[in-house]
Image: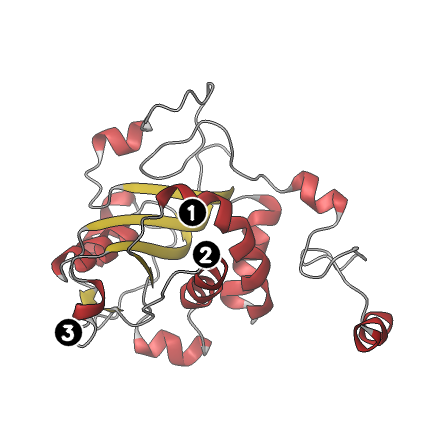
């Protein structure tokens, strides 16, 4: 306790978004918390996007999930990909802020709990080896490990592989994204026994069109997963 007090005196707790002082480590200050759009209430049961209306406990879907075939069963997200939420995702993804995985996983925990089953295995969306070498870490894997620790569920970090190098998807149409990701992600034959017959919870940082998660879900099902759900830190929302 004395050592912790000394450390806090030298390095006081700061907001992970704006560096303002906070009472607890790895959190948001009051101002940033109010500005961060956490997802709650009525949501699409398939992708987690927030919907108008009250949550009556019934399963509902958004317009996209009623028209686009989703190869997974259920989905949730912790916050909307805008403002501070977008800033946090980009800092973790491109700014070497691996420390953000800890608070992000805590926010994702509440979203993920309704998706859990007794045999759930957490599986991160994979990166191509060239991109992993450049970035030095897979942010989805960081989130999966942190989330697995909090939820007390096993994590299979290399259950899926991404042998096909694809171009960045930013700025592409929804159809182009799905076409680009087709066949880009495959199951790892060395890990198939860890997910065959199990419930898989795919973990990623952000969902836009769902193309990457769809390719990952198809690979998980090809490996024999009995059930596939998804959870992301953030969800892109139209007109957010």
Q: Residue 92 at what x, y percent from top left?
A: 54, 64
Which residue position is annotated with label 3? 189
Locate residue 138, reporting x and y percent. Answer: 42, 70
Comparing labels 2 and 3, the label whose residue is closer to the camera: 2
Q: Is residue 198 visible?
A: yes
Q: Is residue 96 left or right of residue 186?
A: right
**Looking at the image, is mark 2 or mark 1 earlier in the sequence?**
1
Q: Is residue 205 above or below residue 58?
A: below
User: Which of the marked residues, 1 or 3, is nearer the chain's N terminus?
Assistant: 1
The answer to whether 9 is drawn above or below residue 144 in the figure is: below
Q: Where is residue 125 in the image (x, y as percent from the top left)?
A: 33, 62
User: Are the residues tagged 2 and 1 within 8 Å (C-beta)?
Assistant: yes
- Is 239 on the left-hand or right-hand side of 97? left
Quarter of the image for residue 56 reads: top left
- Tell me: residue 160, above or below residue 57: below
The answer to whether residue 235 is seen in the rendering is: no
Residue shown at the point (50%, 45%) measured from the top left = 110
Position of residue 206 measured from the top left corner of the image (x, y, whole percent) = 43, 52
Spatial CA distance of label 2 from label 3 is 26 Å
Disc 3 on helix, strand or loop?
loop
Cα separation, mark 1 vs mark 3, equals 27 Å
Circle on res. 151: 2
Give the CA separation, mark 2 to mark 1: 9 Å
Cβ atoms at labels 1 and 3 below 8 Å apart: no
Which residue appears at 82% of the width and 70% of the height? 8
| Quadrant (top left, top right, bottom left, bottom right) of the N terminus | bottom right
Numbered badge on residue 112 = 1
Q: Is mark 2 on a helix, strand or loop?
A: helix
Residue 195 placement: quadrant: bottom left
Applied colour scheme: secondary structure
For discs 2 and 1, the disc positioned in front in the rendered view: 2
């Amino acid at each position: 306790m004395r050592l912790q007090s000394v450390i806090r005196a030298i390095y006081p707790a700061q907001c992970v978004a704006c560096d303002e002082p906070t009472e607890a480590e790895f959190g948001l200050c009051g101002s940033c918390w109010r500005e961060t759009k956490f997802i709650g209430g009525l949501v699409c049961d398939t992708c987690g996007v927030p919907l108008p209306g009250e949550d009556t406990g019934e399963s509902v879907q958004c317009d996209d999930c009623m028209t686009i075939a989703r190869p997974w069963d259920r989905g949730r997200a912790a916050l909307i990909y805008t403002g501070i939420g977008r800033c946090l995702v980009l800092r973790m993804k491109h700014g070497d802020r691996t420390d953000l995985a800890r608070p992000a996983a805590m926010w994702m925990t509440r979203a993920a709990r309704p998706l859990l089953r007794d045999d759930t295995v957490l599986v991160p969306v994979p990166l191509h080896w060239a991109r992993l070498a450049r970035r030095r870490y897979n942010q989805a894997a960081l989130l999966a490990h942190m989330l697995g620790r909090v939820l007390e569920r096993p994590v299979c970090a290399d259950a899926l592989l991404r042998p096909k190098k694809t171009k960045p998807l930013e700025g592409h149409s929804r159809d182009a994204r799905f076409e680009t990701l087709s066949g880009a992600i495959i199951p790892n034959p060395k890990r198939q026994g860890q997910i065959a017959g199990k419930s898989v919870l795919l973990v990623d940082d952000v969902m836009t069109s769902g193309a990457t998660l769809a390719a990952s879900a198809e690979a998980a099902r090809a490996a024999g997963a009995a059930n596939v759900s998804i959870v992301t830190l953030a969800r892109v929302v139209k007109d957010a």
